[in-house]
Amino acid sequence: MTASHLTGSTTGVSALSSNVNTLPGLTLADRQADHSRFVQRVRRRYPDELACLPEGAPERATMQTGLATLLQRGLPMPAALRVLRQLVLERLVVLDCEQGAALEAVTRAVTELAEIALDAACELAFQELDDLHGAPQHPDAQGQTVRAQLWVVGMGKLGARELNVSSDIDLIYVYDQDGETAGNAQGRNRISNHEYFGKAVKHIYNTVGETTEHGNVFRVDLALRPNGNSGPSAVSLGALEEYFLVQGREWERFAWLKSRVIAPAACIADKSSDALRSAVLPFVFRKYLDYNVFDALRTLHRQIRDHASKRAAGNPGRANDVKLSRGGIREIEFTVQLLQVVRGGQFPELRTRPTLDALPRLCRAGLMPQASADALAEAYRFLRRVEHRIQYLDDQQTHVMPTRDDDLAWLAATMGCANVCEFLHTLDAHRELVAQEFDTLLGGPTNGGCSGKGCNGKNGGAPRSSADDLQSVLAQLPVAFAAKVAQWREHPRVLALKEDSRLRLVRLVQRTGAWLEEGRVSEEAALRMADWIEPLLRRDSYLALLQERPSVHERLLRLLGAAKWPARYLLQHPGVIDELASQQLLSDRFDAAQFEAELESRRAALHSTGEDDEEALLNLLRRAHHAEVFRTLARDLEKVLTVEQVADDLSALADSVLRLTARWCWARLKNRHRDEPAFAIIGYGKLGGKELGYGSDLDIVFVYEDEHENAGEIYAAFVRKMINWLTVKTGEGDLFEIDTALRPNGNSGLLVTSFQAYTNYQQQRGSNTAWTWEHQAMTRARFVLGGVSLAGRFDAVREDVITALRDGDSLAREIVAMRDKVRQAHPVRGTMFDVKHSPGGMVDVEFVMQYLVLLHSRTHPELRANTGNINLLRRAEAAGLLAPGMGEAAAQAYRELRQIQHRARLDEAPTQVDAASVAPCAAAVRALWQHVLGPAAVN
């Protein structure tokens, strides 16, 4: 087989596979490690040393034992490390190729070998340099002189513990503080810490990277350090932070994503190296969704492919590079890292280094379908195992498929394939899948362009220049939208945009104009989008998101065209628009268990990096809540959900937020005295009745049952903390307004009461008892969270209250009087009809049902459940408490009035409508009111 068979990417492999159908089948004998020319050399050169490495898979402990044995045989440390590497790799070839070792076992062994080697190299360097110059020093916060530390930062696969068997290692050397060394034993030869650590870097290289008669331990590459090969070999932490802030480039964020301090071991053990994370995390992961990195990744990927093409120009075989060619390992890594960098600032659970660990996390976060994640993981394992076998052949840092027939047959056999043809077909399939996923993620050949008629240039390419770009598109726009865009030509925010951001803005206007011409979106939507995006122009990541995701752009326009309130919500919480990219947006419903699990996962991720302070958790709750409200809003406006389903989902979301807030607040309460609080939250009003709308406040009552002597004080502090967490405004906004006026004795009562006191108050025990209006509220009360025993006891109290024996006439008079007070507080002037407060409106239905429940649930148990007014009306009719058809007519009227109210609020329109348009609804409700509460109550 010749090199000419391998002159393409995946197509070259396909052509090759069609020429090997006649090759004989492969057997276990074809998998022997001694086909490797590297293994042959090691066994010839080190026959006596092979036994120094204990049997089995190389692990940290066995490699350290092997190193100690080699040192005992008289080898100096640098030579012992080199020989150890030869022994470890020879063992891995056997385990991998003959016994099918797991990929993780191989990469972990090579990574741990690098960690052992670099730790030993640091120790040697520090010993020699301390003798010459004394220890590097600096004053600590207390003014005490302490040793300055050097951290060896592993990048890429070394940082992710994914090192391949013949890899070089990408290192960056960072030291914590500038200063001066202590001097030698005579107090002489003092040098700056910068000079000391520069010498240490050279010494470490000599120990690990220099080629000797035993080869090297690892080839060392420092090109990823700040300012690349022109920068200092070691950089201080302060200088690194400044570099990130001033000069750090987008592609470097991908490089630092997998960074990890790997030596010296002592710095890792005492956690002093953790200081580096505080500099790296905000550089890699931005606070907001960061779609600007798409262009950076495209540029980096294009450079890598161009470089690979140039290398292959004189050697066609190089075009089949399992790492760098189309559909190779690098494209899997880029796919994963791009989603991590874009989302990792807001979703800390995505911050993980290993590719195979990141894929399921992306899947759980809804950023990748399960099938895609599984396929990419399978492809990654396959390609990495192929990469290792290529390198096993001659211990060369190469990823190019071999061209010799016997080498290809050995690769196929060790991959468990029946013949070379099967191997190449499998390789082809994996690479094609990877390439498709990568191209899909980066938007394919359109590169996030205009995607519509009327765009300048092929596929919506960039306009001629940014000087006249907005002017050039005005002719294709409708009058009102064109007038708005024309104002941007002199707008300070637009003029302040960077060139690429201005081009993105033009492309969005072009695409919007094309969709307007096609009738896909309305001009009102375009105008609202312009008003929405104008104050956000400083955050060009939103421009990048809309350009990169045409589907998000179109959904956004549809959403804004449907009602006014979504535009206001989006202006307050612009980051939620990324939810429009989800394929499951319209098919899914709110899932409380999944929501809470995701938030707990994010909190745990923040805790693992020491970022779980109170402000971070407040913002975490707010971002998640706003995103979920927006998902419900999108489904609502697309008419996927009914008004009742919207209320159900918003109520369930509020329950989840309350549960999470209670757990996290209790865990952080300084004077807590038990693992779980013995308390409960009772929901009233819209929360209790599961009828929450957008922006509804929460009517809640807090109770506890705890015999601790300071229980009242402890739970009061707990509740105050909870209310603060729920209501305080942060940079991410707030969660809810909280109303506790329905607690015993209202606003003059205790913020949190014992459950016994609450029971006595509701059940009319003692002199301090509830009013009838409070019993009306109890008909809609619901146990929201707390212990199981308290839940059952609350249900019993509620049932006792609503089923108490009552005089019908007295109850009717009190409820009618209360209804009159409410009506006086909300007067309706003129001839318009207020869907909530006018006679025949929604409040009349609610008061009627409260009366029926309080008067009749004693003898009609079917009225006791808190199932909502519509369901209770039907139950009351079935029980004979309403005339035939009256309950159903009132239920339909109530539903229609709710829908009118709901749509009016979404469009920020008044809820007072033309009376004639709702006459049948009002008539049905008036008939209900007169039948139940008497003609004297009808106005």
Image (spheres, grey):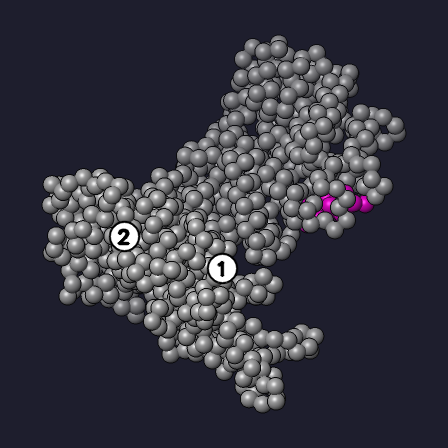
- Residue named by callout 2: 34
* Neighbourhood count class around disc 1 (C-alpha, 10 Å): few under 14, some 14–19, many 20 upward: many
**What segment is highlighted magenta in the picture?**
712-724
Apparent side of residue 278 relative to residue 59 in the rendered image (left or right):
right
Residue where numbered disc 1 is placed = 64
Q: Is residue 224 magenta?
A: no
Relative side of 753 to 250, left or right: right
Q: Nearer the viewer, residue 478 or 602?
A: 602
Residue drawn at point x = 23 percent, y = 57 percent: 400
The quadrant where residue 403 appears: bottom left
Q: Earlier in the sequence, mark 1 or mark 2?
A: 2
Tell me the residue at 63%/39% (across/down).
659
The answer, for residue 227, to whether it is visible in the render is yes
The residue closer to the viewer here, 826 or 132, is 132
Residue closest to the far right = 767
Q: Position of residue 274 (x, y in %)?
A: 56, 63
Which element type, helix, strand or loop, lies under badge 1?
helix
Between residues 744 and 593, which one lies in front from this camera angle? 593
Amino acid bearing label 1: Gln
Is residue 460 visible to the viewer in this orientation of the structure? no
Quadrant where the C terminus sits is: top right
